[in-house]
Structures are given as C-alpha cells and as structure tokens.
Image (cartoon, rainbow, N blue to C red):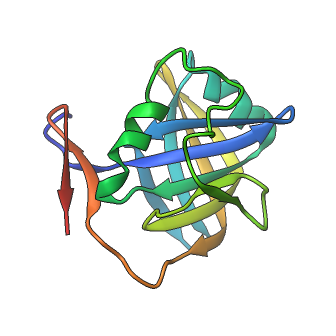
C-alpha cells in the first residue's frame, strides 16, 4: 500500500480535558448524503481511546510546508500534555477540537460508527463543518515511505 499516494492529515480530539492528536494518511470520503468521512486509527495508539470516548474529532489536511507537524504528531511516546504547543490552532465551533492553522482544509466530525478492522478501527464521522481557506498551496503527501507534495 506504500505505492498508493496519500494525503497527510492531523486528526485531533479533546477528551478528559486533554487534547489528543495523531498524523493520519488514511482519511477518506465515504458519502455525500449524509456527508461522511472515515479515518483509520491503530487500536494501540493513545488517540484510539480518546477519539472513541470523545465522539467528536477534527481533520486538518496538511499543506506541504507543514511536514514538521506531521512528523511531530507521528512521534510515538511524545508527551500528552502540551503536545499541541508546537502548533498554532483554533478551536472548532461545533466540537471544540483543535484545528491546525495553515491547513488546506478543516473538518469537524461527530462519530457515526466505529468498525474493528484488524489492528485498527475505522472511525466513520458525520461532517458537521468544513473550513476552507481563501488561498490553497501545495498539499503534503506520503508515498513509498517518504513525504512529497502535489499542487
């Protein structure tokens, strides 16, 4: 699957008074009516328990210049407290989750279903809001284990 070009996003949620985030390259459109997306989350990841408990989550689709954020939120064992200190963000108006500034698109989602799938779960979310910036630059992508960009 490393030969499948994937856009890179950061998923966020807030649970128990703490922000949680993870890098994902498995965010996919599911349905237009109702508007649904999915994300795959490893069951062993700290983010898994938080997103399942919270029931709401955000997607920040990363721009090419946000690679350092992608790498940070993919780092295993990073501290829970203050993990968003490296990222400028605003809170979503519908969910309260962190949405990263400079992202190409933001989605705020409410969990509609969670499906076990091997060592991951598929989290399906109803899109509550979409944020589109006025200007859009190149997107950060992942291909064959490496980062790249596409305009």
Location of the C terminus by quadrant is bottom left
Q: Quadrant of residue 100?
A: bottom right
Q: How many marks?
A: 0
Q: Position of residue 104 (x, y in %)?
A: 42, 67
Q: Is residue 87 left or right of residue 74?
A: right
Answer above or below: position of 34 versus 38: below
Q: Position of residue 90 (x, y in %)?
A: 68, 61
Answer above or below: position of 27 versus 144: below
Q: Is residue 33 visible?
A: no
Q: Residue furthest right?
A: 16
Q: Residue furthest bottom?
A: 134
Q: Position of residue 91 (x, y in %)?
A: 73, 59
Q: Nearer the viewer, residue 16 or 64?
A: 64
Residue at 62% over, 53% down: 58
Q: Nearer the viewer, residue 149 or 43?
A: 149
Q: Nearer the viewer, residue 134 or 115?
A: 134
Q: Position of residue 146 (x, y in %)?
A: 18, 36
Q: Nearer the viewer, residue 99 or 121?
A: 99
Residue at 20% over, 34% down: 1
Residue at 46% over, 85% down: 134
Residue at 55% over, 41% down: 86
Q: Is residue 93 visible?
A: yes
Q: Quadrant of residue 63?
A: bottom left
């Amino acid at each position: 699957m490393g030969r499948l070009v994937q856009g890179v996003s950061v998923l966020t949620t807030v649970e128990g008074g703490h922000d949680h985030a993870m890098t994902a390259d498995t965010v996919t459109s599911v349905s237009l009516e109702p508007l649904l997306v999915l994300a795959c989350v490893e069951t062993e990841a700290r983010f898994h328990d938080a997103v399942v408990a919270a029931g709401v989550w955000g997607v920040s689709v990363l721009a090419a210049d946000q690679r350092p954020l992608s790498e940070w939120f993919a780092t295993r064992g990073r501290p829970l407290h203050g993990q968003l200190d490296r990222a400028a963000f605003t809170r979503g108006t519908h969910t309260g989750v962190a949405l990263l500034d400079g992202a190409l698109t933001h989605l705020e989602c409410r969990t509609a279903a969670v499906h076990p799938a091997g060592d991951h779960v598929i989290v399906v979310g109803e899109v509550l809001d979409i944020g589109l910036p006025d200007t859009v630059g190149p997107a950060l992508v992942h291909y064959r284990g490496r980062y790249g960009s596409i305009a």
